Amino acid sequence: MTLMEFLLKNRENRGLLATLRQGLVPATETRAWPWLGRFDGIGQTPRARAVRTVAGLFGHHPENCDSGNMGDTCREFCRGTDEDPGKATDTPGPVGRRFGWLLAADAEEIGDRVTRIVLYAKSKGIPVNYAQLQKDLERWPRAREAWAGAFWAATQAKGHAQDKDADEGMAS
């Protein structure tokens, strides 16, 4: 059984979710170890930190999705606002600043920073792809480029396609 299978199977177990949330706090993380040990969630390896972080965050916000990464999640924060992550500006909006702060994290900081982003996603009712998040945290900082591409490049590519269509329309 994978971590995600375990989490999804137990998403209604409020007591277990409360215990998993304790894995996010260094002073209480040992309480989550009996549940997370089978998934290599004990210790300070990148995998152990990723397992504890994902399990603890799932305990806070058990709304999972099967696509995207944290860049896509942060893009969702911009829906319904004036902020366009694909438009380069001298002063990024609040989501762009928060996302830049997330990308600037080192391996020791990323767990705390992604926690804040997931809690914000919870407040907005936006699901998180926890399976991808676990993979990305295990290989941090190599996942930065994928997150940045999902946040910024998608709109830029769409904008370039619209520019190209406009140019072709003018040439006709």
Image (spheres, grey):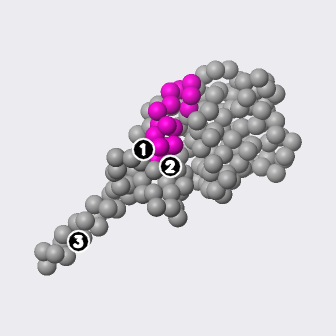
Q: In which quarter of the image is the N terminus?
A: top right
Q: Give the residue type that dot 3 points to.
A: Ala
Question: Alpha-carbon neighbours of circle 2 within 10 Å: few (<14), some, or many (≥20)?
Answer: some
Cα separation between marks 1 and 3: 27 Å
Cα separation between marks 2 and 3: 29 Å
Choose between 152 and 66: the one closer to the eye.
Answer: 152
Q: Give the residue type that dot 1 points to.
A: Ala
36 magenta-colored: no
As displayed, is residue 18 above or below residue 84?
above
**Mark sitting earlier along the chain (1/3):** 1
Residue 57: x %, y % from top left: 69, 41
Q: Which residue lies furthest to the bottom in this view?
A: 172
Q: Give the residue type that dot 2 points to.
A: Val
The residue labelled by disc 3 is 166
Q: Confirm or deny contact between disc 1 and disc 3 (CB under 8 A).
A: no
Question: Alpha-carbon neighbours of circle 3 within 10 Å: few (<14), some, or many (≥20)?
Answer: few
Residue 136: x %, y % from top left: 53, 37
Q: What stretch is highlighted in magenta?
A: 96-110
Q: Mainly helix, strand or loop, the magenta region?
A: helix
Residue pictured at 72% horizontal, 38% vertical: 56
Q: Which is more foreground, mark 2 or mark 3? A: 2
Residue 111: x %, y % from top left: 60, 32
- Say the numbered circle drawn on residue 95: 2
Residue pictured at 59% horizontal, 44% vertical: 117
Q: Which is more foreground, mark 1 or mark 2? A: 2
As displayed, is residue 56 above or below residue 169?
above
Residue 70: x %, y % from top left: 53, 46
Q: Quadrant of the C terminus?
A: bottom left
Cα separation between marks 1 and 2: 13 Å
Residue pictured at 56% horizontal, 44% vertical: 132
Q: Is mark 1 on a helix, strand or loop?
A: helix
The residue labelled by disc 1 is 148
